[in-house]
Amino acid sequence: MTSGTDRATGEPQVYEADDRVDVTMTINGEVVRASVPARMLLSDFLRHELGLTGTHVGCEHGVCGACTVHLDGRPARSCLTLAVQADGCTVRTVEGLAAPTGELHPVQQSFQECHALQCGFCTPGFVMSVAGLIDEGLPNDLTDGELRERLAGNLCRCTGYQNIVAATRRAIELNEQRGPPQPAPRQSAPGGGRRAPAPGASAGRRPTGCTGSTTLPRWDRWMC
């Protein structure tokens, strides 16, 4: 069984494993409506149904942080969150950080400047976690040890974290200088909003060249 919340009553709702549930959520400023299996993970919904492959799946146990997204403005593990639990929520993925003009978010820019990546698999999760910390007012006077503690929910097997810590400091500076760009909300068509394709159907949005390229600013391209 799977639990969720009935939007009409606000009461807890219990679903059987083979139930399908209608959900509506705002993803990167766009209203999305879909019918999903009750047990589908939010990470699988984002990747396989919407083609948002910047959300990576690593350990699938909530340990590595590669699947981090923002759920109602706060970092959350999408591999531990069911799609039905995100019904009525606002979801932001790494694809939604940059401004509509293409200007990078301060965290994306800082990771580029400081080269805070190697294979890139963990990078979107780190970017979303750092962006969340900055949104919460992360100060720039923390020691390296304190910063590493704040970032301990994300794992990297390549870099040794030194440049990630440097990029976090740089992101704070950039954010203080200009503030993070906010994506412009998209207006839904009358009676519509985007509807996700049926499970198993191609979403038609999977990026090409998903071979681990570190060409920036294609944040959906690394090891997808």
Image (cartoon, rainbow, N blue to C red):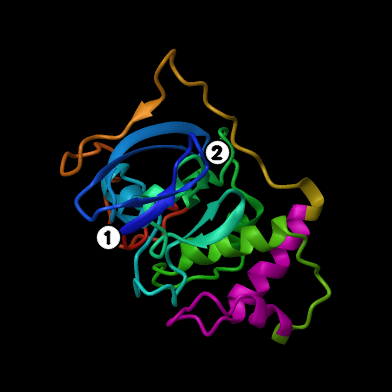
Q: Which residue is mark 1?
A: 211
Q: Main secondary structure of the magenta part?
A: helix
The disc placed on residue 182 is none
Which element carries disc 1, helix, strand or loop? loop
Q: Residue at x 74, y 62 (%)?
A: 172
Q: Position of residue 135 (x, y in %)?
A: 71, 55
**Outermost left residue:** 200
Depicted 98 relative to depicted 122: above or below? above
Q: Evaluate whether residue 218 shows in this view.
A: no
Q: Is residue 113 visible?
A: yes
Q: Of all residues shown, which one is farthest toward the right?
A: 141
| Left or right position of 47 against 163 | left
- Are circles 1 and 2 on residues that touch, CB within 8 Å? no
Q: Which residue is depicted at the point 64% across and 68% down? A: 167
Residue at image x 74%, y 55%? 174
Q: Quadrant of residue 74?
A: bottom right
Q: Is residue 176 magenta?
A: no
Q: Is residue 62 above or below residue 92?
A: below
- At horizontal 37% and vertical 50% (from top left) the residue drawn is 83
Nearest the viewer among 162 and 23 is: 23
Can you give x and y, in whole percent of width and height, for residue 66 in the image?
Answer: 43, 67
Percent x, y of residue 51: 31, 45
Instruction: Say which quadrant the C terminus sits in.
Output: bottom left
The foreground one among 185 and 3 is 3
Inspect the image, locate mark 1, and give the three-letter code of the amino acid beneath it.
Thr
Within-10-Å neighbours for mark 1: few <14, some 14–19, many 20+ = few
For mark 2, what is the residue? Answer: 102
* Range covered by the magenta-colored residues: 146-175
Residue type, mark 2 in image: Gly
Q: Nearer the viewer, residue 143 or 21?
A: 21
